[in-house]
Image: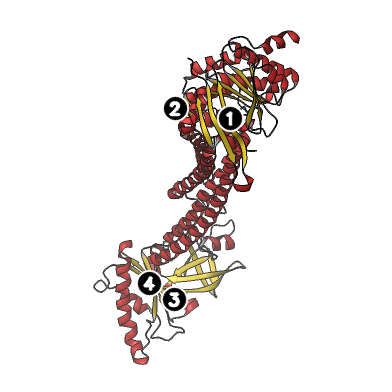
């Protein structure tokens, strides 16, 4: 139980060759414990998207090791990677990335289907996940019938439906207005309070301020690692967010 | 995850884009249907031609003179015709009908009609040439022996000269001589431009007296005892003719060619069938091109479909779909499109083949159905599977970034 969710050692990612070499990540080491709520911030070009892709097992590092929930992801083959993405990680993208012309419920069911869960059980869990994000009544709607904030909450439901070890969000509020942003962040606060491990990549201070831990990335290196509130308590941001507005 | 889940994903994928799915299927439908129908039309016309030739009678051969002019040693005579009816030398010959034929004008009560072939022959000719009498009767052997001036006219002649009147027992004038109409031939289907019904048949000697004179015969129609014996009959006839005709001509000039020509209905049939086969091949080639064009259409739509959904593939991979599942889903989509489209195409072709197309009744060739269906499905699978395989191999991050 004390095994860290993310354990990254000297992660490097190099694009291009020779003169044009770009060090997107120049030796990042990071440990994220279970139940933590981490915001990784940085300006564009700081390497945060690259870090996100590697943490999400969507991309492989040039150098370094990455243990996700005790599994050495950098040594996995394509098939096992797919399995790892399905079982260990829940993705939330900036562009929502729901499957078009497919109902919210079907979208949320999708990772369960790939995990081989029986249809009845799948439906029950998908509806429960939609309930968590407060969209149980929108289960039959297709993505184009939902607002941006609702779509992102469906995406959150889809990410958490498999009970993954890690919820990984890439600029989850980048495409949302402030009201939807606060809706989605409230959901994150709830999930964190429920003991989920969350990593959010963002460049918005408002989002970063609500996390329990803030990591700043500049030129592919960690320059600041700030604990804003204890792991085992409700995030302060949640409290502030709930009573300020 | 099990196979039926993937099938359900594929169905959902297809129904998510109904118009495009329908158009893809339409393309396959047209390709498959046109191949089957065009081949069927070719096949149908070939069949129609062979049916007509078979109607002429396949158990007969026709002996024609090859010589030009009326020189007696190269021309066919009644004596030669009689000689062919020889039970020892030609045991397989059933009947021999000497034929003279010329064009003539028939007049009835001031109405003229030009007949293309006014045939003088014997009674056996009606049966041998597969020309039954429709109304009235054919002339008898006695009529032939007596050279009575009686005539059996074709349907066209009857309609021209006797509109609304029963032509039987009416007197017509042919070349100044009176003939009595005793029968009307049954209607015959025409081959080519010539009207097979524009004819009149009279006893041999009557026609020779009135029209053609006592010169050479136009041809001799020899009927075999059964259709299998046609080739034997042909060689028997050739033997007799060689004896009769070269015996005379050998003294005058050693011509390397025989002075006669034998036409065989089954040979004619074979030639015609070959021609028709060429025609079918040609139509098949045209149809194959349309199938190819249809195939390019399928290819195009499959490429577009998959490329457009690269991002979706990226999402699915990010959610943990293994490569195999994604590939299977797209392959099933492609298969469903081409199989349903192909099946509808076959159905359309089967329905279409019930109608006459440019005067030809199409006859479906079963192998063309299999071929068209097989090719379209293969194209759909290959060009649906190829880009899907490429997309499934993409790293999810690249697929997700794909715009």
| Disc number for residue B2 | 2
Q: Is circle 1 on the same chain as circle 2?
A: no
Q: Residues within 10 Å of mark 2 (few under 14, many from 20)?
A: few
Q: How crowded is mark 3: few (under 14 residues within 10 Å), some or many (20 or more)?
A: many
Q: Is circle 2 on the same chain as circle 3?
A: yes
Report, in whole angstroms, how far the alpha carbon at label 3 lies from the one at label 4. Answer: 19 Å
Report, in whole angstroms, how far the alpha carbon at label 2 lies from the one at label 3. Answer: 81 Å
Chain ID at mark 1: A
**Residue tagged by mark 3?**
B218
B90 and A169: which one is in front? A169
Chain ID at mark 3: B
Judged left or right of residue B356, residue B136 is: left
Earlier in the chain: of badge 2 and badge 3, it is 2
In the picture shown, does residue A103 fall above or below B30? above
**Residue tagged by mark 1?**
A28
Q: Is circle 2 on the same chain as circle 4?
A: yes
């Amino acid at each position: 139980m004390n095994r860290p969710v993310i354990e990254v050692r000297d992660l490097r990612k190099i694009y291009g060759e020779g003169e044009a070499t770009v060090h997107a990540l120049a030796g990042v080491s990071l440990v994220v414990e279970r139940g933590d709520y981490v915001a990784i911030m940085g300006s564009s070009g700081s390497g945060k998207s690259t870090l996100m892709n590697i943490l999400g097992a969507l991309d492989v590092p040039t150098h370094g090791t990455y243990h996700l929930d005790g599994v050495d992801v950098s040594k996995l083959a394509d098939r096992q990677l797919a399995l790892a993405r399905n079982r260990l990680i829940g993705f939330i993208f900036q562009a929502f990335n729901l499957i078009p012309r497919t109902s919210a419920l079907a979208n949320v069911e999708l990772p369960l289907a790939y995990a081989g869960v029986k249809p009845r059980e799948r439906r029950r869990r998908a509806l429960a996940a939609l309930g968590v994000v407060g969209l149980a009544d929108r289960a039959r709607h297709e993505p184009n019938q939902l607002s941006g904030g609702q779509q992102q909450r469906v995406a959150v439901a889809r990410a958490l439906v498999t009970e993954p070890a890690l919820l990984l969000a890439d600029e989850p509020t980048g495409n949302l207005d402030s009201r939807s942003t606060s809706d989605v962040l409230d959901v994150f606060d709830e999930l964190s309070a429920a003991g989920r491990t969350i990593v959010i990549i963002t460049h918005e201070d408002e989002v970063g301020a609500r996390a329990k831990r803030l990591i700043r990335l500049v030129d592919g290196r960690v320059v600041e690692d700030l604990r804003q509130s204890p792991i085992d308590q409700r995030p302060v941001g949640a409290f502030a967010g709930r009573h300020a507005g | 995850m099990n196979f039926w889940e993937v099938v359900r994903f594929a169905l959902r994928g297809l129904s998510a884009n109904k118009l495009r799915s329908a158009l893809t299927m339409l393309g396959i439908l047209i390709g498959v249907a046109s191949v089957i129908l065009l081949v069927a039309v070719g096949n149908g016309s070939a069949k129609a031609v062979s049916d007509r030739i078979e109607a002429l009678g396949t158990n007969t051969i026709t002996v024609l003179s090859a010589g030009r002019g009326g020189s007696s040693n190269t021309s066919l005579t009644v004596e030669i015709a009689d000689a062919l009816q020889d039970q020892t030398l030609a045991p397989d010959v059933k009947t021999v009908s000497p034929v003279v034929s010329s064009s003539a004008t028939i007049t009835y009560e001031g109405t003229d009609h030009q007949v293309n072939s006014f045939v003088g022959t014997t009674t056996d000719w009606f049966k041998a040439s597969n020309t039954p009498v429709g109304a009235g009767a054919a002339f008898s052997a006695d009529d032939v022996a007596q050279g009575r001036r009686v005539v059996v006219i074709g349907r066209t002649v009857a309609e021209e000269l006797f509109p609304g009147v029963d032509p039987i027992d009416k007197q017509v004038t042919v070349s100044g001589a009176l003939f009595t109409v005793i029968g009307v031939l049954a209607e015959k289907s025409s081959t080519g431009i010539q009207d097979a019904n524009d004819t009149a048949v009279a006893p041999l000697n009557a026609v020779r007296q009135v029209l053609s004179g006592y010169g050479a015969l136009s041809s001799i129609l020899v009927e075999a005892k059964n259709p299998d014996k046609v080739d034997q009959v042909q060689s028997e006839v050739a033997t007799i003719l060689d004896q009769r005709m070269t015996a005379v001509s050998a003294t005058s000039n050693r011509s390397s060619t025989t002075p006669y020509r034998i036409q065989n209905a089954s040979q004619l049939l074979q030639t015609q069938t070959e021609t028709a086969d060429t025609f079918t091949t040609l139509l098949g080639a045209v149809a194959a091109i349309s199938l190819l064009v249809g195939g390019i259409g399928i290819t195009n739509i499959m490429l577009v479909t998959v490329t457009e959904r690269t991002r979706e593939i990226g999402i699915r991979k990010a959610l943990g779909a293994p490569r195999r599942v994604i590939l299977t889903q797209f392959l099933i989509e492609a298969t469903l499109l081409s199989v349903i489209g192909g099946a509808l195409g076959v159905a359309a072709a089967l329905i279409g083949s019930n109608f006459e197309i440019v005067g030809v009744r199409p006859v479906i060739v079963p192998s063309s159905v299999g071929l068209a269906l097989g090719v379209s499905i293969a194209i759909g699978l290959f060009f649906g599977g190829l880009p899907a395989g490429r997309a499934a191999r993409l790293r999810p991050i690249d697929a997700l970034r794909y715009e």
